[in-house]
Amino acid sequence: STSTPGSLVNLDLCAIADSTITDADPAGNLGATSTLRLGYGAGQNEPFAYRSLVQFDLSFIPPGTQVLSAAFEMRLIQAANGVPTNVYLYDLNDPWEEMTVTWNNQPVILQPFVTRTPVDGATGAVFAWDVKGLVQKWIDNEPQNLGLELRGPEGGITWSRLFDSRHYTPFCPRLTLQLRSSLPIPTPTHTPTPTPTPTATPACTGTDAGNS
């Protein structure tokens, strides 16, 4: 289905790729795991840093579409040292592949960070980062959409946060968007994430707010 031109469109988009990278295993790939980890230290033979990469497909959204709001959301499932810790979100300068990315070949981030959100130890909570400006740039291809990176402090006090990844979980990392376009915006086709058992989480959902 497609939206009516000029109407408000609400979309929830699941990530199409995600992975943790860590210097604890600099040549290892974690793209198929059920969690995304962020942190510094908090484990045996530490300290090591943990970062996460996430990517979305926005290619179906017409250039010139106005982004009225955009939030990146992840659900926290485990925390060590629950003191609120700023998690920074960066745009990326290089392409990467979910099943081959490692610490050693990780993409370069674009400075400065886009936004930050303090994440405490409230397991089960959904945390959000305001990415309205970044998504607008991606839709306008300025810069190209190569995904995002999340990282926190990598020194000092040890901490760890585990979030649901897009694999084998009921809550995928997602973009929650409200858009307006002079052109129709098609509702993306559902592409299930391979899982050992079916889940109720769609790859994406969309509503035409103007016609709801």
Image (cartoon, rainbow, N blue to C red):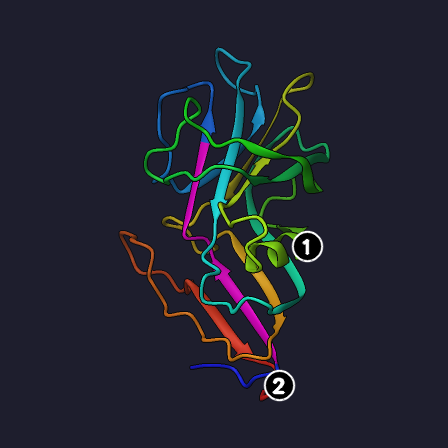
Q: Position of residue 48 (x, y in %)?
A: 53, 18
Where, by quadrant of the figure, is residue 200 drawn?
bottom left
Disc 2 to disc 1, C-alpha distance: 23 Å
Three-letter code for the amino acid on which mark 1 is drawn: Gly
- Residue at the spot 50% in from the left edge and 67% down from the top edge: 61
The residue sitting at the top extreme is 45
Identify residue for label 1: 133
- Above or below, 104 against 146 in this view is above
Q: Position of residue 197 (x, y in %)?
A: 28, 56
Which contiguous range is marked in magenta? 8-20
Query: Magenta span: helix, strand or loop, mainly?
Result: strand
- Residue at the spot 62% in from the left edge and 85% down from the top edge: 210
Q: For the N terminus, which image quadrant?
A: bottom left
Q: Secondary structure at mark 1?
A: helix
Identify residue for label 2: 210
Front one among 107 and 38: 107
